[in-house]
Image (spheres, rainbow, N blue to C red):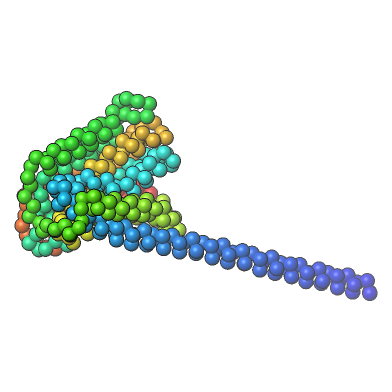
């Protein structure tokens, strides 16, 4: 009887010790879980803070970039359209360049590299339409901009048509082991386009109808160039950090692999264009804003040549999905509408946006709907 009682007591103590041990393990797991949750929350908070800080820096430095670009156009006589087409377009398109290189060389994804470029070109034209809402009712953006932008829009359309054709061609003519004739032609046509635009802005005296700003006293060409370069470096630095934070936010919110997540990343890389163009509109430099957006589209196709050079696969255009051709055709249609707006030169807006801007907006939405339908399971 006593032995039975002793065994029962031992069993009870063993169960009690086991319960205590399980309780301690549960507490330790809870502590580790809370710690991991705290770390994840901290990382998430850092991503949001980093994204917000980069966006604020881009908008602040972008407004300075537009101001100094306006001064450069007055001091050099090159014109606001040329400053926007070449200098600002190259600066604001660097995020697309870095995203394209990482997508092609590191990730090895032709779809990501081309989707980033085509999406950026379409968004730039959408931004061109949306900026029209910030213009006075009797001054549509395309109707008051320099007719010389027709040349830039046409060259951009030619480059985009070449890119769309390169995707749809059944075979690529190989020039080098990692480059095809289509990608090589992007580089050739880009250099020709820059030369043509430079000669046009040098030889043709385009009468600007927009408000011009005087250069403050004491602001020499050297000083303005240094300040412009400093603002450009700040924009580039913040813009290059921005896609990383945007990618982290997209993954944390579960949007990383979705259509919405891809769209979010594309808009994030276009923040420099938004900041610079919006600041130019507020300054009254419509030509600089239009030149920046159209010039960015020209530079973006040149980026495809660089992406193909570093692509880890065979050929960038051939490895990409044919669905990208839809975006290429949408950009061509949007660019053609912009050319019509620059040529017809309407002097009033019936709604908050001119007809040409409204049509560009509609084409962009239709493009998104088609792509979403094709990519949805």
Residue located at (23% from left, 50% from top): 222
Q: Quadrant of the N terminus?
A: bottom right
Dividing the picture into quarters, in which one does residue 163 lie?
top left
Does residue 239 appear left or right of residue 42 in this picture?
Answer: left
User: Of all residues shown, which one is farthest toward the right?
Assistant: 2
Count every numbered label the image shows and give the total. Answer: 0
Dividing the picture into quarters, in which one does residue 45 lie?
bottom left
* 202, 29: nearer the viewer: 202
Residue located at (29% from left, 58% from top): 61
Q: Is residue 64 visible?
A: yes
User: Of all residues shown, which one is farthest toward the front?
Assistant: 218
Residue located at (74% from left, 67% from top): 21
Q: In the picture shown, does residue 324 fall above or below 139?
A: above
Tell me residue 277's x, y (percent): 22, 55
Tell me residue 288's x, y (percent): 17, 52
Q: Is residue 369 visible?
A: no
Tell me residue 232's x, y (percent): 30, 51
Does residue 183 appear left or right of residue 206 in this picture?
Answer: right
Tell me residue 47's x, y (percent): 43, 60
Residue located at (41% from left, 38% from top): 105
* 323, 117: nearer the viewer: 117
Does residue 42 appear left or right of residue 93 in this picture?
Answer: right
């Amino acid at each position: 009887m006593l032995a039975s009682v002793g065994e029962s007591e031992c069993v009870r103590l063993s169960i009690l010790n086991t319960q205590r041990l399980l309780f301690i393990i549960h507490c330790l797991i809870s502590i580790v879980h809370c710690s991991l949750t705290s770390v994840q929350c901290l990382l998430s908070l850092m991503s949001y803070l980093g994204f917000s800080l980069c966006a604020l820096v881009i908008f602040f430095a972008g407004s300075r970039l537009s101001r100094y670009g306006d001064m450069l156009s007055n001091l050099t006589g090159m014109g606001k359209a040329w400053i926007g087409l070449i200098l600002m377009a190259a600066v604001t398109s660097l995020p697309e360049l870095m995203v394209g290189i990482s997508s092609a060389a590191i990730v090895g994804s032709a779809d990501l590299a081309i989707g980033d470029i085509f999406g950026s070109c379409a968004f730039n034209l959408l931004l061109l339409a949306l900026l029209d809402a910030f213009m006075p009712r009797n001054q549509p953006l395309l109707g008051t901009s320099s007719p010389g932008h027709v040349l830039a829009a046409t060259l951009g359309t030619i480059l985009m048509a070449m890119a769309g054709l390169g995707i749809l061609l059944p075979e690529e003519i190989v020039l080098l082991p990692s480059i095809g004739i289509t990608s090589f032609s992007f580089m050739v046509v880009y250099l020709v386009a820059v030369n043509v635009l430079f000669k046009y802005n040098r030889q043709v005296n385009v009468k600007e109808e927009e408000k011009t700003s005087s250069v403050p006293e004491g602001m020499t060409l050297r000083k303005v160039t240094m300040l412009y370069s400093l603002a450009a470096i700040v924009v580039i630095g913040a813009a290059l950090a921005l896609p990383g934070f945007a990618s982290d936010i997209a993954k944390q919110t579960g949007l990383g692999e979705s259509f919405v997540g891809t769209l979010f990343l594309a808009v994030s890389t276009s923040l420099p264009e938004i900041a610079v163009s919006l600041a130019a509109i507020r300054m009254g430099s419509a030509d600089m804003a239009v030149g920046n957006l159209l010039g960015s589209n020209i530079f973006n196709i040149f980026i495809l040549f660089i992406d193909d050079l570093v692509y880890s696969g065979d050929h960038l255009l051939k490895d990409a999905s044919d669905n990208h051709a839809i975006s290429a055709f949408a950009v061509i249609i949007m660019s053609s509408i912009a050319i019509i707006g620059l040529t017809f030169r309407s002097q009033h807006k019936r709604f908050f946006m001119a007809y040409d801007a409204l049509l560009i907006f509609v084409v962009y939405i239709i493009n998104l709907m088609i792509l979403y339908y094709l990519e949805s399971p």
